[in-house]
Image (spheres, grey):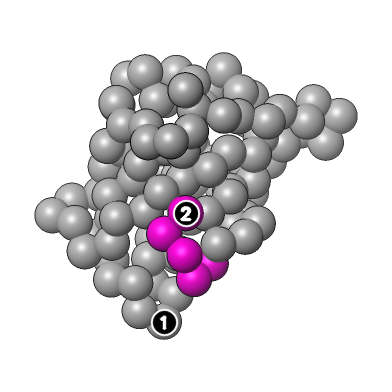
Amino acid sequence: MLEIIENIAAGTVIFAVRVQPRASKDEIAGEIAGALKIRLQAPALEGRANEALIEFLAELLKTPKAAVRILNGERSRIKRVEIRGITKQQIERLFMQDA
């Protein structure tokens, strides 16, 4: 089950993602060990996959890129992401539609 932490007072949602770089297309590929699995075309070089992850999530959730932040795991496939201005339900709906 995808673990999502919602801080209503701060207006943020935090969840884990597992990134697969150099995929054939950008997509949500389900859930793995409590994290949202995301495939990205970008390589894991010079932060390109991190930037692609931020852009991908911002586009899917129709939020500015500045609202999406990688909290930790910048050099790892597993990352904790914080997004401002959305709800836990929006993340859950996204997962249900695309997974």
Q: Note whether 39 is above or below 2 in the view shown.
A: below
Counting from the top left corner in percent of width and height, residue 54 is at 48, 55
Instruction: Describe residue 99's horizontal placement relative to residue 54 as left or right.
Output: left
* Chain part drawn in magenta: 74-78
- The mark lying in front, picked from 2 and 1, is 2
Q: Where residue 64 appears, x then y in whole percent?
A: 57, 48
Whether the magenta-drawn stretch holds residue 75 is answered as: yes
Residue drawn at x 37%, y 18% as measured from the top left:
96
Residue 50 % position (x, y): 45, 64
Residue where numbered disc 2 is placed = 78
Q: x%, y% of residue 10? A: 83, 36
- Residue kind at label 1, given as amino acid type: Glu
In contact (CB < 8 Å): disc 2 and disc 1: no
Q: Is residue 90 above or below residue 58?
A: above
Element type where label 2 sits in the image: strand
**Quadrant containing the C terminus in the rendered view:** top left
Question: In which quadrant of the rendered view does residue 29 lie?
Answer: top left
Q: What residue type is labelled 2?
A: Ile
Query: CA–CA distance between discs 2 and 1?
Result: 17 Å
- Is residue 79 magenta-colored? no
Dot label at residue 57: none
| Neighbour tally class for label 1: few under 14, some 14-19, many 20 plus, Cα within 10 Å | few
Q: Residue at x 57, y 17 (%)?
A: 89
